[in-house]
Amino acid sequence: MSRHHVTTTINGDNVEFLCDTEQSLLDCIRNELHMTGTKEGCGTGDCGACSIMLDGRLVCSCLALGVEAEGKEIMTIEGMAQGDELHPLQENFIKFAALQCGICTPGVLIAARALLEKNPDPTETEVRFWLAGNLCRCTGYDKIIRAVMATAAQLRATA
Amino acid sequence: MPHVIFMGEARRFTGDVAELDVEAGNVMQLYRKLGERFPELKPILEDGFSVAIDGEMYEDSLLQPIKPDAEVILVPKIAGG
Amino acid sequence: MPDDVKSADIKEFKYVGKRNPRPDGVDKVTGRAKYGADLLLPGMLYGRVLRSPHAHAKIISIDASEALKLAGVKAVVTRDDFKDLPKAQPPFGPMIHDAADVTRNIIAREKALYDGHAVAAVAATSEAIAKKALKLIKVEYEVLPHVIDPVDAMKDDAPILHEDQFTVGVEPKPSKPSNVFRVMKAEKGDVEKGFAEADIIIDREFKTAAVHQGYIEPHACVANASEDGSAELWCSTQGQFNFRAVCATVLGMPVGKLKVTSSEIGGGFGGKLPVYGEPLAIRLSQKAHRPVKMVMTRDEVFRSTGPTSGSHVRIKIGAKNDGRIVAAEGVLTYQAGAFKGAGLAAAIGCMFSEYDLENIRIVGYDVCVNRPKVAAYRAPGVPMAAFGVEGVINEIATKLSIDPVDIRLKNAAKQGTVNVSGIKYGPIGFIQMLEAVKAHPHYNAPLGKNQGRGFAAGYWMHAGGMSCATLNVQDDGTVNLLEGNPDIGGSRASMAAMVAEELGIPYDKVRVTIADTASLGFTLFTAGSRVTYATGMAVVEAARNAIKVCCDRAAAAWGVTPDQVKWEEGHAKPASANVGDFAPMSLSELAKKAPMMGGPIAGHAEINATGQGPAIGAHLVDVETDPETGFVKLLRYTVFQDVGCAISPDYVEGQMQGGAVQGLGWALNEEYVYNAKGQLQNAGFLDYRMPVASDVPMIDTVMIEEPNPNHPYGVRGVGETPIVPPQAAVINAVENSVGLRLSELPMSPPKLLKAIEDGRLKKAAE
């Protein structure tokens, strides 16, 4: 069976890849495009480690198919910093020690960024429910929540 | 002479002997003497036990000196996660 | 944090104790950091494992011929590709190292012993082909009766997992094989006498479910074997040196021919101490002559790795009317899984050890059942026993109308206390901690309807062990530190802080690298809360050795003796005005001149850290229980812990918070659920429900800093203690919110609702 040719945009770059019909978008990003910043924790959409933006929507890339990326815009963790400048969420995750092992961090950052674009002034409860799809086993979430809240405040102050 | 006390798991191999004076200047000498006295204990002393010398823990320390008036207890090794 | 309690013995430092950004932070927030599954090698094959669907079955035959015919399949391995290894023989020490068990756990031999047990593995040019190949391997099983619960496994008519296993530690020596590997005992004083003196005796049984470590990164590795007999392994592990040793043994390779590199590790908590697919990947690579990547699915992680023991625990404690405990007894029945070795020694050594008790007796049963072999999980073995101990102490406090903190103050271990193992404590901060609990605003905060507050304490012994460090000073005065512990929670930051402090140079001039097994001497795994303690000691010693080189050179340059030179704020200086008037020499100057002053400047250390010590914690939690649904909402949580000296306070707090939330999952939701055939029913994150962000409140922390005299900066291991108290604390809070005594984990909504309804019925009947 021949493979599908997919043309898409990832972090602003035009890319092409070949994939099987049943191959997940996560698999394509990691193993066809060799961008390994997006992580696989479960493959069933339960842990959020593979979170990406697909045409501006937050999705678990393990639940999307590679062929679905045709003609779309993908944004991954590798596209979050602008040149030398980290995104304020990235800065604050380091500052607030919001990561320990770091495997969930790319997904959490993508999800948190999506939240702040939608809701620049979330309550703690709103942050917790938004991030409920991103499992972290190390931190107990405390410092993650603090980092997201602090970033929101910082972005509001500079907006 | 150092005084050795057997508690818990160690006691399983020393029968009725709960304590004993052993002529030994360090842990290696102590293990050799204990191994001679209690052959069942001999193969597992080094891998299975640490020693508390006067209450202070020493793990994998065959060369640790033992003072003549010391009290020594064999403490089962434990593994962490 | 204003609430933290710092002993006067803790000095102010420039980098130690400060919130420095972690050196690997940028890599980890940009997706740059490489984890187990992130290595791609040219020509790499994909390995997959065929696993037993049966809980207990004889393997009659394995036929892989059809799989090998599939285009793209390059190699298959089965039990025939691994030599049987000698079985450990009695007597057994407290630690079990049985190569025969290890080789049977990585790939089944005579029998498959649990649902998920590896039976064969294939390497193919794609994942899809590898998966297809698994379906073509024909395995003929003879299904045998199985047993899942340890109490059932101890019955006379229970199916026997190992026909050659005879219980150790019972007299007379048994003549029939048993699932009970051994009975462990510990005793101090005279419990009978103690109970005879007691005014109140509480005797209760508790049950806890098996739970998984739940790291988000599945086990992953890439093996690359050469025709010259050597091999390289890249993998997610808590200890590359330990993995090298075990893989070399299982594969019959000389240790020096195997190089293991630890990738960044996406969580371990004890679950990445054992090898699983790694030896299979190396063997596949040897057979296929190509690199082989092997990554587990989440389903495989749940079915085949971890978990910790489920348990039945009986606790009996006697006390005087004033709350003084006079006797304590425990019977622990722990699942070992398919092979012997539950965490009993640790449980026995820790369960009563934050208390100063005269009379203790503990008996533990290490029981094989048809489940995956248990792996260490954060303070392995202790939380289950502590759940019972703390529950009974809370019940005694209630019955005697004593405050739960006061009853612990009455019995608290202090300097000079001797525990059940015979260890006499140096300075420990338990009393200060209990006082800090009472003084904390959380302790007396008002509670509303259906709300309850719970309290519990916990004890762990942090480990020491072998560690190496090499520190190279570069010609511009920057420093490369090489150490051997995979960084799971920010340990690079602590190491860099200690080096910067010792050398007197800026923190960002220190670069920390985790060494592969060919680049450094043996360093014991990242486990047992040992890294900042033991490897920290090696790192400090390496720095001091480099300083000695610097001081010796300054002395030679000035024509004085080395003891006339001191190291201060990054400079060699005359030790006193009498030595002479010499301009101080900085590390940068010495580094720049090093080629002309004897060669490169380095310091290294190879140590075996002894002096493992107590690390105690206490947790306070508020909950609200919905009596209509049995749902428990967590309202407020505070963790108190004696941390010795917090080198990196951010990451010490992180350990306290993360451990607490794992304990909350254990208390309220998590459990392994098996069907009647012994197959795991909830092998995924959706059904094995770990805490998510919306389940928990902020986790406040209070660090008690009572320095550990055995470490140059006073460090105590902090990682494991925080998972010990939460189970008892949260159940105690639930009890106080609904007025019931509870004894089983997890206290999930259906179970709690049933308990509430049974309580209502009981009340109505009365």
Image (tube, coloured by chain):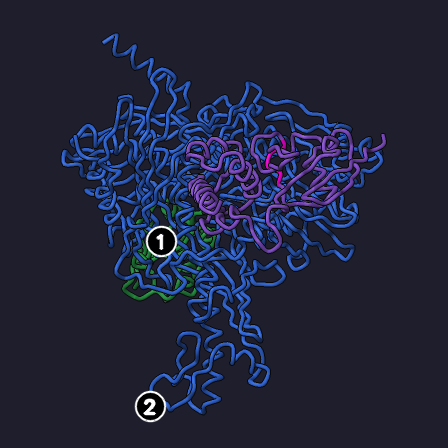
Chain colours: A purple, B green, C blue
Chain letter of mark 2 equals C
* Left or right: C367 in relation to C730: right
Mark in the foreground, 1 or 2: 2
Q: Position of residue C243 (x, y in %)?
A: 59, 50
Q: Residue C407, can we see it?
A: yes
On the same chain, marks 1 and 2? The answer is yes
Q: Residues within 10 Å of mark 1 (few under 14, many from 20)?
A: many
Of residues C666 and C91, which is closer to you in this image?
A: C666
* Left or right: A25 in relation to C402: right
Q: Position of residue C490 (x, y in %)?
A: 48, 52
Q: Secondary structure at mark 1?
A: loop
Q: Is residue C600 above or below residue C737?
A: below
Q: Secondary structure at mark 2?
A: helix
Q: Which residue is mark 1?
A: C613
Of residues C406 and C167, which is closer to you in this image?
A: C406
Q: Residue C162, can we see it?
A: no
* Left or right: C709 in relation to C178: left
Q: Quadrant of the C terminus of chain C?
A: top left
Which stretch is magenta?
Answer: A39-43
- In the rendered structure, find residue C578 and report the number of the disc placed on it: 2
Q: Amino acid at mark 2?
A: Asn
* Left or right: A133 in relation to C457: right
Of residues A49 and A70, which is closer to you in this image?
A: A70
Chain letter of mark 1 equals C
Of residues C640 and C616, which is closer to you in this image?
A: C640
Q: In this view, which residue lies farthest toward the front? A: A159
Q: Magenta region's main secondary structure?
A: loop
**Residue C112 location, quadrant:** top right
Q: Amino acid at mark 1?
A: Gly
Q: Is residue B52 above or below residue C474?
A: above
